[in-house]
Amino acid sequence: MSHVTTFAKARLLAPVTLLLALAACSGKDEPKPADAPATPAATGTTAAPAAPAVSAKVQSLGTEELRELASKALRENRMYAPAGDNAMEYYLALRDKTPDDASVKSALTDLLPYTLIAAEQNLTREDFTEAQRLVALIEKVDATAPALPRLKQGITGGMQTALKRTQEETDKVKKDAETRAKQLVEQQRQAQQQAGEAEAARQIAAQQEAARRDTDRQDAERQATARREAEQRQQQAAAQQAAAARATPAASPSLRPVSTPAPRYPADALRSGTSGEVLVEITVGTDGSVTNARVLRANPARVFDREALNAVKRWKFEPVGAPVTTRRTLAFAPEGG
C-alpha cells in the first residue's frame, strides 16, 4: 500500500514537475563533443540495427521497483534522459508488465510532449543518435503519433545533409592539398632555376673580374680611398647629429586628461574639519592609464596619502607615444571651510 500511495503522490505532482522541468531539461542538454563518434550518415557506413527503446536492464526490473524509480526520475526531472535511467523507460516497462494500469498510461501521455520537444532539439543540433533514441521512445508510447513521420524524415534528411557536407569538406580539403602540392612543386622549380641562374652569373662575374683585375687595380684603390673618406664624413656628421640630439632636451608629451575623479575625503579628517594637500608623482603609460604613483609631500603627513593615491591610480589620460612622469597636487578642504 505504501508503494501505491507514493506513486499516487508522484502522479499528482507530475504535471507541475514536468512543466517546471521543460526549460531546465532543454537548457542543460550538453552540446555534442567535437570528438564524438561520427554518425552512420557522416561516415557513409550502413547503420547498425536500432537498439530497443527500453533497455534490457530496465525491462528486467520488477513492477514495484519500476514504480519507485519512475517516481524518483520524475522528482529529479529525468523525464526522457539519460538513456536507461529516465521516467519514460520506467513507465514503458511498467506498461508492458501492467497494461491495464491507467495511471501508467496517463504518465506516459504527460511525458510524450516533452520527449517530442527534446527530439526536435536534438535534431536541430544534429545529434542524430539521441534523436533516434527519443523517436524510438515516442514510437513505443504511441506508434500513431502525428509527429513521428516528420521526425523520422528529419533524421534521415539531416543525416544525408551531414554526409553531403562532410563529403564536400573532404573534397575541399583534398583539392586544397592538391593545390598546395602543385604550388610547392612550382616553387621548388623556380628556386632551382634561380639558383642555376645565380651560379651562372657568379661564374661570369668571376671571369670578368679576373680579366680586368690588372688594369682596374688603380681605379679600385682610388674608389676605395674615396669610399673611406665618404664613410668618415658620414660618421662625423652622424656623431655631430647625435651630440646635438643629446644636447637638446626631449620635450615631454603633454597629458590630456580623460577622467580624473576627485579623491574621497577621509571620514576622520572630515569630522575634525582637517584640510591639507598631497603632492604625488605619477607615471602615465602609453595607453593613458596610471602605471605608478607615489607621495612626494603631504601636509599634514599620513592623513590624506592613502585616498590621494587611490584617486590618481584611477585617473585616465589620452594615449601617449611614450610613458610620461609628472606631478600633481591634490587639495583636501571640507566644504564650507
Image: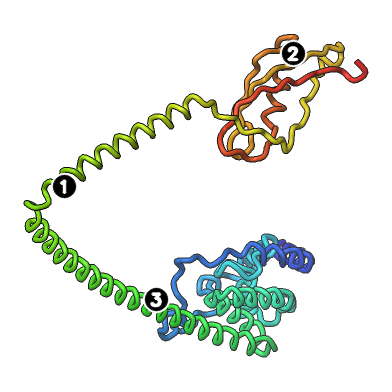
Give the total of numbered labels.
Answer: 3
Q: How is the image coloured?
A: rainbow
Residue sticking out furthest to the right: 336
Residue 303 is marked as 2
Instruction: Give the vertical position of 8 relative to 249 (above or below).
Output: below
Q: Secondary structure at mark 2?
A: loop
Q: Is residue 158 left or right of residue 298?
A: left
Q: Is residue 314 above or below residue 5?
A: above
Q: What residue sits 59% from the left and 73% below the top? A: 125
Q: Earlier in the sequence, mark 1 or mark 3?
A: 3
Between 305 and 86, the one nearer to me in the picture: 305
Q: Which residue is mark 3?
A: 173
Rendered location of residue 206, percent (x, y): 11, 58
Mark 1 or mark 2, earlier in chain: 1
The residue indicated by pointer 1 is 220
Query: Which residue is rendered at x = 75% and y = 9% of the image?
Result: 300
Looking at numbered disc 2 in the image, what kind of residue is underneath it? Val
How much space separates mark 2 and mark 3, taking CA atoms?
70 Å
Which quadrant would residue 123 be assigned to in this image?
Answer: bottom right
- How many C-alpha atoms fall within 10 Å of the one at disc 2: few (<14), some, or many (≥20)? some
Judge from the rendering whether residue 217 lies leftward or rightward of residue 255; answer left or right.
left
Is residue 199 visible to the viewer in this orientation of the structure?
Answer: yes
- Amino acid beneath label 3: Val
Q: Quadrant of the C terminus?
A: top right
Tell me the element at label 1: helix
Q: Earlier in the sequence, mark 2 or mark 3?
A: 3
**Residue 302 picture quarter:** top right
